[in-house]
Image (cartoon, coloured by chain):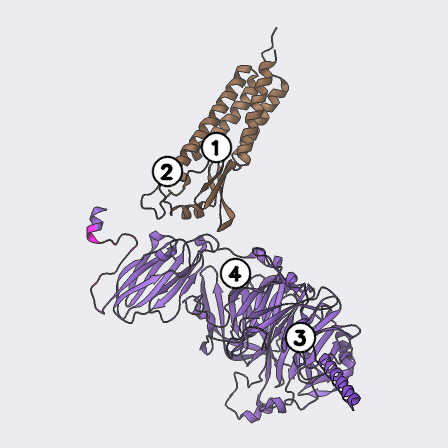
């Protein structure tokens, strides 16, 4: 009996030991010893790469240094930013104008750097507004938003703003199909199949100035366009879009749009579309959309409403669009650096289909179609397929490339990044992410020339990765070293908003073009004061224009009297400094909008309406010098109808007795 | 019989010195470099024959804190005279090569050295005036502190380190002086 007890005891000890050994290791062990050294950038040293990260629902774009993960700047794009006066100063308000009026917020998902010959040229970065469809261009000389164009016939501008390899076009596909803007939208929602259409905008980009204009829109079947990428190299001239909801459901899409085993990748021959456009096959459509442009000489944005676009109907005009079946509601649609392989990623698929550009061309030539979908030919799956990556993980979303023949795909459901070889479709390595990864980014990873040193994963969920901060937690990015055969996690860093797609580029491509200040001699703002001698206060009816200057460490004028209740006051503040990193701020008590943050050589205007009689202090908000705290002034507000004369001065408005002794 | 003419090499060097002087009109003669913690890239004043160049506006902006007068080229008559004076010396050197007599050579050297000394005294005088003639209403007043930059070398002025050295033109000027001095010594020792 005792023997039996001993035996049982031994068995249970072995079992417990064995079972606990089976429990997966703590995932934190994924970080190995030399990770810190790889992500370390010593104080005072520059990072090797710029990383431009979408701000998601913050509406902005953030700039990080890699490999340190240090936040360098948040560029206001689609949302107001009171800190910088963006969307509040009279000069920047027009940037956020739309056909709906001023829209102070949006949802920025995808940044895309401009390219020349398929390589990142570092001139501009584009971003999309998902909610009120727009595309923005940011100038990388100033890291500021230069231009925003609204997109008619669109809703949920998601497959945007991807570009062709010489930045000929920025493309924007509508996520929601909708009735066209020139049609009656007051129809039952259940008439989706009859009345709703998908539109894809081709925005031309000025070769020198980058100015955007809608060249044409493709009218496509009423389905959801999700993501896209341009062909490159041999497939330059083509564009590829992932499509879902080919069921054309208008309600409970999570069920009703997941019925078909396969949706589509849509291949677009845009050179063909250009031919039709040239041949006058386009239809002019009356629409209404805003185009906003910020002029760096007048330091002022101008918004104009445009009234026409040209539509090419892809059902009537053959040979522009082709559908390729792709399993399980595809999301990512990525083209490898050679332009031959197109990777579609079905959100719920357990495999990754890789399509071949050559095979697609052959299938079109041979008319290897399985039928038509709403007038568009559907190429046979096998006729376009290069091969499938088997059992890569669950829920593939996005793929980036290293230019060495490998692809890296994110898996949302299984929370991992998987490296696989494009030629033989074999999985080479996999690493966990924390948690639920969305987009990936390799510097130049969607261009013809990737720089494959790092890979960054942008995660949707962080849970236990950082100190808790109440119900709302940080979003995060994770940096992997991919210079070796195996991927190695080296850093976590939190991000602003929710990061979606991102771009990265070697610092040298951008850093030497950075503007240090604006030349005051070239300032053509209507309300500029080019020196303290030209400052003035002018009354025009109930409008009071204050032409003011800021220089370390005073405003001129800093004593203003004669403003009356009922007046509208405009502070036109010019920063006279001509040196790098000397902004001045301007704030006045009771302002219901924001502050101004004025760069050297720039003029910005704050509108202010006094709401009461009294004394209103104003001051510089940007710590500019040792005497920054002295950089202040007063504005006196008298009752309506008061006869206090309009006066302004700096340094001379002394008490009578002191003035006499001076 | 004693020859009073100069060696051929001396005359060639004199002409060369005259030509070198003409270059000085086009390049900076002197520079004052300023370094401070918040100016890691440094600020520089370059003194040319016809004016001060470099970060003049930035330095003027900073100097108002200590009440120093702002720098303006039109306040210096030297910048009008200097290009002509340098031209005159170039002519003197070339002429003395043509005259081919020791007294002419001696005159060239002594007038050039005298000019150098007067120029440096003048430079020091300007530095002294700018460093000491301060606005009594200045925001920063440090008792006993003057802001005269060094004539040559390094000096700490509050948070700025000032480093004053000849620039290309200055070095050319010194080179010309050394060449003419050497010629003179050789010619005088030659019987």
Tell me the chief SS of the magenta region.
loop
The purple-tinted chain is: A
Rendered view: A342 above or below A348: above
| Same chain shared by disc 1 and disc 2 | yes
Foreground residue among A607 and A310: A607
Residue at label 3?
A27
Foreground residue among B105 and B127: B127
User: Residues under labels 1 and 3: Cα distance?
Assistant: 75 Å
Q: Which mark is residue B83?
A: 1
User: Residues under labels 1 and 4: Cα distance?
Assistant: 41 Å
Q: Position of residue A226 (x, y in %)?
A: 62, 80
Pair 1/2: label in front: 2
Q: Position of residue A271 (x, y in %)?
A: 67, 72
| Same chain shared by disc 1 and disc 3 | no
User: Residues under labels 1 and 2: Cα distance?
Assistant: 28 Å
* Image quadrant containing the N terminus of chain A: bottom right
């Amino acid at each position: 009996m005792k023997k039996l007890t001993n035996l049982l005891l031994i068995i249970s000890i072995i079992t417990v030991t064995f079972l606990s050994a089976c429990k997966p290791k703590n995932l934190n062990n994924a970080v190995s010893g030399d990770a810190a050294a790889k992500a370390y950038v010593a104080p005072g040293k520059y990072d090797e790469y710029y990383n431009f990260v979408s701000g998601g629902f913050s509406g902005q774009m953030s700039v990080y240094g890699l490999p340190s993960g240090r936040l360098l700047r948040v560029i206001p794009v689609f949302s107001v930013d009171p800190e910088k006066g963006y969307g509040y100063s009279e000069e920047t308000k027009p940037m956020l104008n739309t056909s709906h009026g001023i829209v102070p917020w949006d949802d920025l998902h995808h940044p895309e750097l401009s390219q020349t010959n398929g390589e990142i040229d570092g001139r501009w970065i584009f971003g999309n507004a998902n909610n009120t469809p727009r595309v923005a261009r940011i100038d990388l000389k100033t890291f500021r938003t230069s231009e925003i164009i609204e997109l008619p016939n669109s809703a949920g501008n998601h497959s945007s703003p991807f570009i062709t390899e010489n930045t000929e076009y920025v493309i924007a596909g509508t996520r929601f199909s909708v009735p066209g803007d020139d049609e009656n939208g007051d129809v039952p929602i259940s008439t989706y199949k009859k009345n709703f259409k998908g539109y894809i905008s081709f925005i031309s980009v000025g070769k020198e100035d980058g100015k955007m204009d809608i060249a044409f829109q493709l009218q496509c079947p009423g389905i959801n366009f999700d993501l896209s990428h341009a062909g490159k190299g041999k497939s330059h001239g083509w564009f590829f879009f992932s499509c879902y909801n080919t069921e054309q459901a208008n309600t409970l899409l999570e069920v009703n749009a997941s019925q078909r085993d396969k949706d589509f990748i849509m291949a677009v021959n845009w050179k063909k579309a250009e031919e039709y456009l040239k041949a006058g096959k386009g239809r002019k459509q009356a629409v209404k959309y805003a185009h906003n442009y910020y002029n760096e000489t007048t330091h002022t944005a101008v918004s104009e409403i445009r009234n026409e676009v040209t539509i090419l109907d892809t059902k009537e005009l053959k040979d522009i669009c082709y559908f390729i079946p792709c399993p399980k509601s595809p999301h990512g649609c990525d083209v490898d650096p050679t332009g031959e392989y197109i990777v579609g990623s079905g959100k719920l698929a357990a495999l990754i289909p890789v399509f071949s550009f050559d095979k697609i061309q052959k299938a079109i030539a041979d008319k290897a179609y399985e039928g038509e979908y709403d007038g568009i030919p559907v190429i046979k799956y096998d006729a376009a397929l290069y091969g499938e990556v088997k059992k890569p993980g669950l829920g593939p979303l996005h793929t980036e490339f290293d230019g060495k023949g490998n692809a890296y795909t994110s898996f949302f459901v299984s929370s991992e990044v998987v490296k696989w070889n494009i030629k033989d479709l074999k999985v080479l390595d996999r690493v966990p992410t924390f948690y639920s990864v969305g987009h990936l980014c390799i510097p130049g990873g969607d261009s013809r020339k990737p720089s494959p040193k790092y890979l960054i994963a942008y995660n949707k969920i962080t849970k236990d990765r950082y100190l808790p901060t109440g119900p709302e937690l940080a979003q995060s990015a994770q940096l992997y070293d991919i210079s070796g055969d195996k991927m190695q996690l080296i850093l976590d860093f939190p991000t602003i908003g929710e990061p979606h797609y991102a771009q990265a580029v070697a610092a040298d491509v951008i850093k030497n073009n950075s503007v240090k200040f604006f030349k005051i001699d070239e300032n053509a703002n209507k309300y500029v004061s080019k020196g303290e001698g030209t400052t003035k206060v002018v009354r025009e009816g109930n409008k009071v224009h204050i032409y003011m200057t800021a220089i370390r460490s005073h405003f001129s004028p800093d004593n203003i009297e004669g403003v009356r209740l009922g007046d509208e006051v405009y502070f036109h503040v010019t920063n006279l400094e001509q040196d790098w990193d000397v902004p001045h701020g301007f704030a006045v008590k009771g302002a219901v909008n924001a502050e101004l943050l004025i760069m050297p050589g720039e003029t910005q205007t704050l509108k202010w309406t006094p709401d009461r009689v009294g004394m209103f202090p104003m001051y510089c908000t940007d710590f500019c010098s040792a005497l920054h705290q002295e950089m202040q002034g007063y504005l006196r507000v008298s009752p309506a109808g008061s006869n206090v004369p309009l006066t302004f001065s700096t340094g001379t408005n002394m008490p009578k007795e002191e003035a006499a002794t001076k | 019989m004693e020859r009073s003419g100069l060696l051929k090499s001396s005359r060639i060097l004199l002409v060369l010195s005259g030509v070198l002087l003409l270059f000085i009109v086009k390049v900076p003669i002197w520079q004052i470099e300023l370094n401070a913690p918040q100016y890691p890239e440094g600020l520089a004043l370059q003194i040319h024959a016809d004016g001060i160049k470099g970060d003049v506006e930035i330095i003027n902006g900073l100097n108002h804190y200590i009440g120093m007068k702002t720098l303006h080229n039109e306040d210096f008559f030297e910048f009008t005279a200097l290009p002509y004076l340098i031209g005159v010396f170039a002519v003197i050197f070339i002429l003395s090569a043509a005259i081919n007599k020791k007294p002419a050579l001696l005159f060239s050297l002594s007038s050039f050295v005298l000019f150098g000394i007067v120029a440096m005294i003048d430079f020091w005088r300007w530095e002294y005036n700018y460093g000491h003639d301060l606005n009594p209403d200045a925001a920063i007043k440090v008792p006993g502190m003057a802001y005269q930059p060094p004539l040559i070398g390094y000096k700490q002025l509050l948070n700025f380190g000032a480093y004053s050295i000849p620039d290309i033109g200055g070095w050319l000027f010194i080179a010309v002086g050394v060449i003419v001095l050497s010629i003179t010594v050789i010619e005088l020792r030659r019987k």
